[in-house]
Amino acid sequence: MPRPVRSAQSDDTIEPELLRFAARIRRLREERGQTLDELAGISTLSKAYLSRIESAERQPSLAAMFALARAWDLPVGALFEDDTNSDVTPVERHASVEWTGDADGEGYVRVGSGTVEGPTSQEMRHAGEGINPEELLGAAQAGCFTMTLVRLLSDAGYAVKQVSTNAAVHCQDGPDGFRITRIDLQTEALVPGLPEASLSDYAMRARRTCTLSRAVTGVEIAVSASLAI
């Protein structure tokens, strides 16, 4: 089994300004219907460099900012405009729990789409039965990570055939209550032409930048990645 790939502490904390800039650059490219290859061709920046900018892994140089502005015929300042006042529609997702009784009672969990619902209780939670918050978090983390990894690989020009990710959510019950201590993600990818070392790099970038990873900041998230045979 591959050893978990862990990033340095500095990789775990991405400046919010850099994340916003990365999202802005990606939005500007997608608004024009451009691929990374096409943007690389008109900006003279490499596709790999652009991919790292959009993943908030690389802080662009001043020369790169001017190159992007020229490619899109925009003033440099437009690269930093706040998208919050644009025509982007905010997205909401919903879930609910109905609880009957005291702490020893029972609840019923529903996600807004209706695709997941079922009973829950303290006893079930500690036994890993029914629907429990830890498994829901694991599913959300695995799903978000996988979709981000597929996007990164696709943007880099790889023809992704399949990616499977398992999440192991580690918990402990102590004097301070029941808590999550670590999430281990194990992913296997079928991507023709992709070296395993490159897959590990893309997997770490997906872990750092996916929505759930940025939201769950108080828990260590480790990733191991291997190519499917």
Image (cartoon, helix red, strand yellow):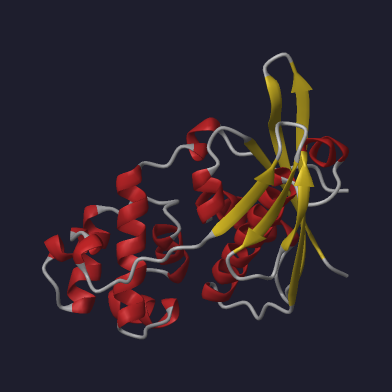
The image quadrant where one finds the C terminus is bottom right
In depth, the one of 115 and 109 nearer the eye is 109
Q: Is residue 65 left or right of residue 188?
A: left
Instruction: Find residue 75 and report its horizontal and vertical position in percent.
Output: 11, 68
Up/down of 48 relative to 225, above or below: below
What residue is rendered at 65% in x and 60% in y? 110
Image quadrant assignment for residue 226: bottom right
What residue is rendered at 60% in x and 60% in y? 144
What residue is rendered at 41% in x and 69% in y? 46
Q: Is residue 36 left or right of residue 174?
A: left
What residue is rendered at 37% in x and 83% in y? 34
Residue, far front:
101
Up/down of 113 relative to 123, above or below: below
Work out whether residue 170 can be spotted.
Answer: yes
Work out whether residue 167 can be spotted.
Answer: no
Q: How many marks?
A: 0
Image quadrant assignment for residue 148: bottom right
Instruction: Find residue 81 and report its horizontal and vertical position in percent.
Output: 18, 61
In depth, the one of 122 and 64 nearer the eye is 122
Image quadrant assignment for residue 172: top right
In depth, the one of 86 and 164 nearer the eye is 86
Q: Is residue 177 left or right of residue 85?
A: right
In depth, the one of 85 and 80 nearer the eye is 85
